[in-house]
Image (cartoon, rainbow, N blue to C red):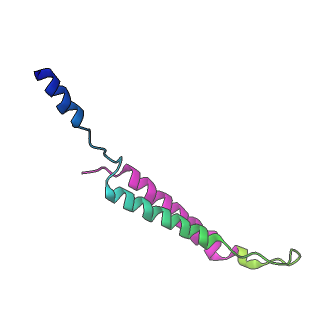
Amino acid sequence: MKNNNNNKEQAQEQPKQEFLFDGINYKILLIGIAVIALGFILMSGGGSKDPNVFNEDIFSFRRIRLAPTTVLIGFGITIYSIFKKSK
């Protein structure tokens, strides 16, 4: 009889489902993804509607220096969010 009650108690106890990271890790990860998306948005544009006309805007500071740097910073933020230890 005693074993039967013990089995019922064990069946009722379900392990708590824990997330892989804490909430702060997910927030930092989302910020990193947003920064990466911003970098790709900064890279866009600069094309020409006429294929015979060359547009110099493709070599602007924003597309050559700022946007790739922004993307790399975003990747750094996401890597930091993965390696950040929970408390």
User: In this image, 69 relative to 8: left or right?
Assistant: right
Q: Residue at x 16, y 23 (%)?
A: 4
Q: Residue at x 78, y 78 (%)?
A: 55
Q: Nearer the viewer, residue 46 or 29?
A: 29
On the image, the x and y values in percent for residue 41 come to: 60, 71
On the image, the x and y values in percent for residue 38 come to: 54, 70
Q: Nearer the viewer, residue 53 or 38?
A: 38
User: In this image, 31 relative to 54: left or right?
Assistant: left
The correct choice, above or below, for 11 with respect to 38 in the image is above
Q: Residue extending furthest left?
A: 2
Residue range corresponding to the magenta coloring: 59-87
Q: Nearer the viewer, residue 10 or 49?
A: 10
Q: Residue extending furthest front?
A: 1
Is residue 61 found inside the magenta-colored segment of the image?
A: yes
Q: Nearer the viewer, residue 53 or 17?
A: 17
Q: Residue at x 19, y 26 (%)?
A: 7
Q: Residue at x 34, y 48 (%)?
A: 19
On the image, the x and y values in percent for residue 62 come to: 61, 75
Is residue 43 found inside the magenta-colored segment of the image?
A: no
On the image, the x and y values in percent for residue 26 come to: 38, 57
